[in-house]
Amino acid sequence: MPSTRYVLLAGAAATALLATACSGAGAGGSSGGGKSINVLMVGNPQMEDIAKLTKSTFTKDTGIKVNFTVLPENELRDKVTQDIATQAGQYDVATIGAYEVPIWTKNGWLHELGSYADKDTAFDKADLLKPMVQSLSGSDGKLYALPFYGESSFLMYNKDVMKAKGVTVPEHPTWQQIADIAAEVDGAEPGMRGICLRGLAGWGELGAPLTSMVNTFGGTWFTKDWKAQVNSPAFKKATNFYVDLVRKHGEAGAAQSGFTECLNAMSQKKVAMWYDATSAAGSLEDPSASKIAGHVGYAYAPTVKTKSSGWLWSWAWAMPKTTKNADAASKFMLWASSKKYEKLVGDKLGWARVPAGKRASTYEVPEYQKAAGSFGDITLKSIEGADPADPGVQPRPTVGVQYVAIPEFQDLGTKVTQEISAAIAGKTSVDKALDDGQKLAEAVAKNYQK
């Protein structure tokens, strides 16, 4: 992932981002009249689905044309930050997450969306899961993004492989148990590796599963009083464990593997296990895209010192203050996060592919219960069990399970994971990567120690 510059109030950082944004090409300004909107979104399966369904449904019903720009996660984060933070105004809607919302609302970059949801009785805002609402609200308690889907993290495994090897995966495994199982099933089928773990640099790629592992190993990026801990014993132990596991039993080309690559590896029977987002289950259970549909087992996120370790995230629709098409944009977002849209996906594409994890009612739909019988309950419990305020063994200076909720983390997390990805590729050592990362973290910490 390219180094992502996040706008700080400090002039130097703001100037750097502005220069980056001005040099890039965009999708063009929004069309006038509110009949055409530009939507920037991450290229995950759920977003690919909505891009296919919109024209024949939403556009047909409303007359509003939706121009989608779909990018890989790392590129999306760069582009959306550039557009919204610099007030470029190229997009009317963008997918962002729990990390961005509280920071960007303080800067006045986003439209408040709760009032739009309140006016649409069919939307049923009260049905949204409480963790999603809390994570997408500003300090004023207002909702600034509408969840498209929500997720935690868990372990996914090939039940046929485990059965053939006589291996039982615990419902609540430890990381050592997972490492032992990965060694046991490595090579169980020709070309199959034991586990897939993200190795692609990026605070939201490699950084997400790694930080959740650091938490449960007893580590943290910063102590409550802002002392950097990147090369502390617990952080180092977790990172060595992660890197060793993926180097010994992980997927081929691990240093370039993110969510999308691991999804493909798991669904095509190239790996026996995968620790990642709960939202991946719908794709793994889709027989049109997965060779292991109906043969996947699920277990809670592995732990060491904590009772749970699953992260909390939502890809959500946000509306920049710069849009000139607020009415049309809000109509699209309300539709995209509605019960009606979930039913559309269920009827057209299969109920396992519904963008779930955001509404309580989803888990009461008989068709969804049947399609998601193997993963629905564990997904919901993982989301409800995630604790962004207390994800580890020590007090934290701010919230976040798989990230640190400060503007500087986007750059810090990316730079540190670039070095760790290099360690996975065998180009550097974990010790050097973390020692270099410690210096970067200490520089960030000074801003808050004052």
Image: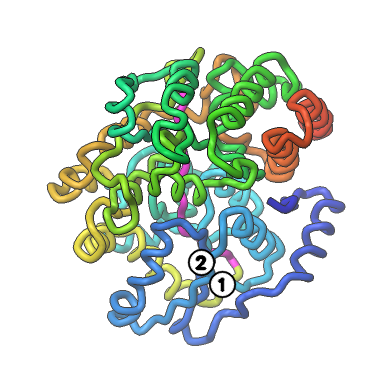
Please give the name of the residue rendered at 23% of the width and 66% of the height, measured from the top-left corner.
348
Give the residues in magenta: 309-321
Residue 104 seen in the figure = yes
What count of labels does the image hold? 2
Query: Mark 2 and 1 residues: CB-CB less than 8 Å, in contact?
Result: yes
Is residue 171 in view?
A: no
Q: Position of residue 110 (x, y in %)?
A: 56, 59
Q: In the image, what residue type sits under mark 1? A: Thr
Which residue is at the far front? 190
Q: Position of residue 326 (x, y in %)?
A: 48, 72
Mark 2 highlights which residue? 93
**Furthest residue to the left?**
366
Residue 427's place in the image compared with 181, above or below, is below
Residue that label 1 marks:
323
Name the foreground residue: 67 vs 325: 67
Q: Is residue 115 above or below residue 217?
A: below
For label 1, the crowd category at 10 Å Cα-Cα, with few meaning under 14, some 14 to 19 and many 20 or more, is many
Mark 2 is on which residue type? Val
In the rendered structure, does residue 341 fall within the stretch colored magenta?
Answer: no
Describe the element under mark 2 as helix, strand or loop.
strand
- Identify the residue at horizontal 49%, vertical 45% (top origin): 262
| Residue 434: image location, x then y, percent | 76, 27
Q: Residue furthest bottom?
A: 33
Quadrant of image for the C terminus = top right
- N-term-proximal mark, 2 vs 1: 2
